[in-house]
Image (cartoon, rainbow, N blue to C red):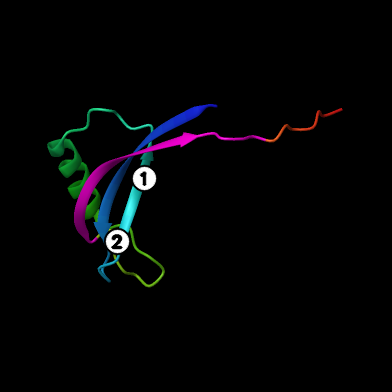
Amino acid sequence: MATTTTKHLELQFRNDKNQLKKITLNQPKPDVNADQAKQALETIQQTGGFLDDEGLNLYATVEGAVYVTRTVDDIYQAEQPEEN
């Protein structure tokens, strides 16, 4: 039985309609601190350059940043047929 663990950094925002929007970074630096996260979030938010089809700002308000760790334990994997 194999176990796989992955870690992502989610940058969270609210759009102009107050809906939660996320930017997910795969393989992030493991030691991002609150000041670094805040600076990155505010830089993205302040650009105002991420608009949807209606012209609404996707990242209008900073919500926060979190690490998301996912662990998957394989229980059973079917054998794959051999390729000729």
Residue 80 horizontal/vertical position (percent): 74, 33
Give 4 or 58, whichever is nearer the viewer.
4
Q: State left or right for residue 77 relative to residue 63.
A: right
Tell me if mark 1 has few (under 14), some (14-19) or many (20+) residues whose alpha carbon lies within 10 angstroms of its own: some
Checking the image for residue 20, the label placed there is 2
Dot 2 falls on a residue whose secondary structure is: strand
| Highlighted range, magenta | 60-77
| Within-10-Å neighbours for mark 2: few <14, some 14–19, many 20+ | some
Q: Magenta region's main secondary structure?
A: strand
- Where residue 16 appears, as percent x and y from the top left, is 26, 69
Q: For residue 55: magenta?
A: no
Residue 73 colored in magenta in the image: yes
Q: Is residue 24 left or right of residue 30?
A: right
Q: Nearer the viewer, residue 81 or 18?
A: 81
Residue 5 location, quadrant:
top left
Position of the N terminus, as image quadrant, is top right
Q: Please, what is the three-letter code of the amino acid marked with disc 2?
A: Leu
Q: Are marks 2 and 1 in contact (CB under 8 Å)?
A: no
- Which residue appears at 33% of the width and 53% of the height? 22
- Residue occupying image coordinates x 27% and y 71%: 17
Q: Quadrant of residue 8?
A: top left
- Residue lying furthest left: 35
Q: Position of residue 44 (x, y in %)?
A: 25, 49
Assign the C terminus to one quadrant of the image.
top right
- Whole-percent x, y for residue 75 in the image: 56, 35
Q: Give residue 24's mark.
A: 1
| Amino acid type, label 1 | Thr
Marks 2 and 1, how far apart in space? 13 Å
Residue at x-position 31% and y-position 69%? 56
- Element under disc 1: strand
Above/below status of 53 relative to 11? below
